Amino acid sequence: PGFRSPDLVRRDWVREAPDLVWVADFTHVRTREGWMYVSFLQDGFSRRILGFTVRASMGAELVTSTLLQAVSVRRRTNPTFVGDGVIHHSDAGSQYVSLALTEKLLDLGVAGSVGRVGTAHDNALMESTIGLYKTELVNRRAIGWDSRQELETATARWVAWFNRERLHGELGYRPPIEIEMEYLQNQRLPRQAA
Protein backbone atom coordinates (compact mmCIF):
# COMPACT_ATOMS: atom_id res chain seq x y z
CA PRO A 1 0.00 0.00 0.00
CA GLY A 2 0.98 3.63 -0.48
CA PHE A 3 0.98 6.50 1.96
CA ARG A 4 -2.39 7.52 3.40
CA SER A 5 -2.73 11.26 2.86
CA PRO A 6 -4.51 13.46 5.41
CA ASP A 7 -7.84 15.10 4.60
CA LEU A 8 -6.77 18.50 3.24
CA VAL A 9 -10.26 19.39 2.00
CA ARG A 10 -12.50 18.76 5.03
CA ARG A 11 -15.67 18.82 2.91
CA ASP A 12 -14.78 22.21 1.39
CA TRP A 13 -14.57 21.24 -2.29
CA VAL A 14 -15.78 24.49 -3.71
CA ARG A 15 -12.92 26.92 -4.20
CA GLU A 16 -12.58 30.29 -5.89
CA ALA A 17 -10.70 29.03 -8.95
CA PRO A 18 -10.23 25.92 -11.08
CA ASP A 19 -7.49 23.40 -10.31
CA LEU A 20 -7.38 23.93 -6.57
CA VAL A 21 -9.40 20.84 -5.59
CA TRP A 22 -10.04 17.83 -7.78
CA VAL A 23 -12.34 15.13 -6.43
CA ALA A 24 -12.19 11.50 -7.54
CA ASP A 25 -14.09 8.25 -7.11
CA PHE A 26 -15.36 5.30 -9.11
CA THR A 27 -18.42 3.12 -9.40
CA HIS A 28 -19.33 -0.21 -10.96
CA VAL A 29 -21.77 -1.03 -13.76
CA ARG A 30 -22.98 -4.48 -14.81
CA THR A 31 -22.61 -5.39 -18.49
CA ARG A 32 -23.06 -8.66 -20.37
CA GLU A 33 -19.23 -8.88 -20.35
CA GLY A 34 -19.21 -8.64 -16.54
CA TRP A 35 -18.73 -5.80 -14.08
CA MET A 36 -17.10 -2.64 -15.41
CA TYR A 37 -15.57 0.02 -13.21
CA VAL A 38 -15.94 3.69 -14.12
CA SER A 39 -13.59 6.19 -12.52
CA PHE A 40 -14.19 9.96 -12.55
CA LEU A 41 -12.16 13.04 -11.65
CA GLN A 42 -13.92 16.40 -11.30
CA ASP A 43 -12.86 19.98 -10.61
CA GLY A 44 -14.43 21.30 -7.39
CA PHE A 45 -14.75 24.88 -8.66
CA SER A 46 -16.51 24.32 -11.97
CA ARG A 47 -17.86 20.78 -11.46
CA ARG A 48 -16.25 19.93 -14.82
CA ILE A 49 -15.42 16.24 -15.23
CA LEU A 50 -11.78 16.33 -16.31
CA GLY A 51 -11.28 12.62 -16.75
CA PHE A 52 -12.99 9.26 -16.72
CA THR A 53 -11.84 5.70 -17.30
CA VAL A 54 -13.81 2.48 -17.88
CA ARG A 55 -12.05 -0.79 -17.06
CA ALA A 56 -12.92 -4.41 -16.31
CA SER A 57 -10.55 -4.27 -13.32
CA MET A 58 -10.62 -1.93 -10.35
CA GLY A 59 -6.87 -1.87 -9.78
CA ALA A 60 -4.78 1.26 -9.28
CA GLU A 61 -4.45 1.72 -13.05
CA LEU A 62 -8.16 2.63 -13.14
CA VAL A 63 -7.57 5.76 -11.06
CA THR A 64 -4.07 6.68 -12.28
CA SER A 65 -5.36 6.64 -15.85
CA THR A 66 -8.15 9.05 -14.91
CA LEU A 67 -5.67 11.37 -13.19
CA LEU A 68 -3.42 11.43 -16.26
CA GLN A 69 -6.43 12.13 -18.47
CA ALA A 70 -7.33 15.15 -16.30
CA VAL A 71 -3.78 16.50 -16.58
CA SER A 72 -3.91 16.00 -20.35
CA VAL A 73 -7.21 17.90 -20.57
CA ARG A 74 -5.69 20.85 -18.71
CA ARG A 75 -2.53 20.79 -20.86
CA ARG A 76 -4.63 21.11 -24.03
CA THR A 77 -5.54 24.67 -23.06
CA ASN A 78 -2.41 25.40 -21.01
CA PRO A 79 0.65 23.47 -22.25
CA THR A 80 2.64 24.54 -19.17
CA PHE A 81 0.05 23.19 -16.71
CA VAL A 82 1.59 21.40 -13.74
CA GLY A 83 -0.14 19.97 -10.72
CA ASP A 84 1.45 22.32 -8.19
CA GLY A 85 -1.32 23.76 -6.04
CA VAL A 86 -3.86 21.07 -6.96
CA ILE A 87 -5.34 18.90 -4.20
CA HIS A 88 -6.54 15.46 -5.38
CA HIS A 89 -9.27 14.36 -2.94
CA SER A 90 -10.79 10.89 -2.75
CA ASP A 91 -12.12 8.32 -0.35
CA ALA A 92 -9.83 5.83 1.37
CA GLY A 93 -10.27 3.04 -1.19
CA SER A 94 -7.22 0.88 -1.81
CA GLN A 95 -6.75 2.33 -5.30
CA TYR A 96 -6.50 5.85 -3.89
CA VAL A 97 -3.93 4.96 -1.23
CA SER A 98 -1.96 2.71 -3.61
CA LEU A 99 1.73 3.22 -4.21
CA ALA A 100 1.04 3.69 -7.95
CA LEU A 101 -1.30 6.66 -7.42
CA THR A 102 0.79 8.11 -4.58
CA GLU A 103 3.87 8.13 -6.83
CA LYS A 104 1.95 9.63 -9.76
CA LEU A 105 0.61 12.44 -7.55
CA LEU A 106 4.15 13.15 -6.32
CA ASP A 107 5.51 13.14 -9.88
CA LEU A 108 2.88 15.70 -10.90
CA GLY A 109 3.29 17.87 -7.80
CA VAL A 110 -0.33 17.22 -6.78
CA ALA A 111 -1.17 16.99 -3.07
CA GLY A 112 -3.10 13.88 -2.09
CA SER A 113 -6.08 14.18 0.24
CA VAL A 114 -8.13 11.27 1.59
CA GLY A 115 -11.38 11.38 3.54
CA ARG A 116 -12.15 9.21 6.53
CA VAL A 117 -12.94 5.53 6.09
CA GLY A 118 -16.66 4.76 5.85
CA THR A 119 -17.72 8.42 5.63
CA ALA A 120 -19.29 9.12 2.23
CA HIS A 121 -19.88 12.76 3.21
CA ASP A 122 -16.11 13.36 3.08
CA ASN A 123 -16.35 12.90 -0.71
CA ALA A 124 -19.94 14.06 -1.18
CA LEU A 125 -19.31 16.18 -4.29
CA MET A 126 -18.00 13.19 -6.24
CA GLU A 127 -20.61 10.87 -4.74
CA SER A 128 -23.28 13.28 -5.99
CA THR A 129 -21.83 13.30 -9.51
CA ILE A 130 -21.70 9.51 -9.58
CA GLY A 131 -25.34 9.49 -8.44
CA LEU A 132 -26.22 11.72 -11.38
CA TYR A 133 -24.27 9.43 -13.74
CA LYS A 134 -26.21 6.41 -12.49
CA THR A 135 -29.58 8.22 -12.65
CA GLU A 136 -29.10 10.09 -15.92
CA LEU A 137 -27.31 7.39 -17.90
CA VAL A 138 -26.69 3.96 -16.40
CA ASN A 139 -30.10 3.18 -14.86
CA ARG A 140 -32.10 4.63 -17.77
CA ARG A 141 -31.10 1.77 -20.02
CA ALA A 142 -33.76 -0.85 -19.37
CA ILE A 143 -32.10 -3.49 -21.57
CA GLY A 144 -28.79 -3.20 -19.76
CA TRP A 145 -25.32 -2.72 -21.20
CA ASP A 146 -23.79 -5.14 -23.69
CA SER A 147 -20.09 -4.36 -23.40
CA ARG A 148 -17.35 -2.21 -22.01
CA GLN A 149 -17.12 -0.42 -25.37
CA GLU A 150 -20.83 0.42 -25.38
CA LEU A 151 -20.66 1.73 -21.80
CA GLU A 152 -17.48 3.71 -22.50
CA THR A 153 -18.97 5.36 -25.61
CA ALA A 154 -22.18 6.27 -23.76
CA THR A 155 -20.17 7.57 -20.78
CA ALA A 156 -18.07 9.79 -23.09
CA ARG A 157 -21.28 11.28 -24.53
CA TRP A 158 -22.74 11.81 -21.04
CA VAL A 159 -19.54 13.50 -19.81
CA ALA A 160 -19.53 15.84 -22.84
CA TRP A 161 -23.19 16.71 -22.18
CA PHE A 162 -22.58 17.08 -18.41
CA ASN A 163 -19.69 19.51 -19.02
CA ARG A 164 -21.14 21.53 -21.91
CA GLU A 165 -24.93 21.49 -21.55
CA ARG A 166 -26.17 20.19 -18.21
CA LEU A 167 -27.37 23.04 -16.02
CA HIS A 168 -26.15 22.82 -12.41
CA GLY A 169 -28.12 24.52 -9.65
CA GLU A 170 -24.93 25.08 -7.63
CA LEU A 171 -23.51 26.99 -10.62
CA GLY A 172 -26.48 29.32 -11.10
CA TYR A 173 -28.05 26.90 -13.61
CA ARG A 174 -25.08 27.04 -15.95
CA PRO A 175 -22.86 24.26 -17.31
CA PRO A 176 -19.29 23.67 -16.04
CA ILE A 177 -17.56 24.76 -19.26
CA GLU A 178 -19.35 28.11 -19.11
CA ILE A 179 -18.13 28.63 -15.53
CA GLU A 180 -14.53 27.93 -16.54
CA MET A 181 -14.72 30.15 -19.64
CA GLU A 182 -16.12 33.02 -17.56
CA TYR A 183 -13.36 32.57 -14.98
CA LEU A 184 -10.63 32.60 -17.65
CA GLN A 185 -12.16 35.64 -19.35
CA ASN A 186 -12.24 37.52 -16.02
CA GLN A 187 -8.57 36.66 -15.44
CA ARG A 188 -7.66 38.23 -18.80
CA LEU A 189 -9.51 41.50 -18.21
CA PRO A 190 -7.23 44.42 -17.37
CA ARG A 191 -7.47 45.47 -13.74
CA GLN A 192 -9.28 48.74 -13.23
CA ALA A 193 -7.28 51.46 -11.50
CA ALA A 194 -8.65 52.34 -8.08
Image (spheres, rainbow, N blue to C red):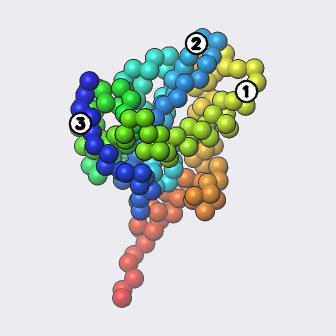
Point out which mark residue 65 bears.
none
The residue lying furthest to the top in this view is 33
The residue singled out by tag 2 in the image is 34
Q: Which residue is found at the position 52% from the left and 29% from the top?
A: 27
Please tell me in which quadrant of the rendered image residue 158 appears: top right
- Asked which secondary structure carries label 2, the reply is strand
Mark 1 closeness class: few <14, some 14–19, many ≥20 residues within 10 Å: few
Mark 3 closeness class: few <14, some 14–19, many ≥20 residues within 10 Å: few
The residue singled out by tag 3 in the image is 107
Question: In this rendering, is residue 23 above or below 31?
Answer: below
In depth, the one of 88 and 9 nearer the eye is 9
The residue singled out by tag 1 in the image is 141
Q: Which kind of residue does numbered mark 2 sit on? A: Gly
Residue 63 drawn at (x, y percent): 40, 29
Task: Pick whichever of labels 3 and 1 is earlier in the sequence.
Answer: 3
Q: Which residue is found at the position 57% from the left and 58% from the top?
A: 170
Q: Are marks 3 and 1 in contact (CB under 8 Å)?
A: no
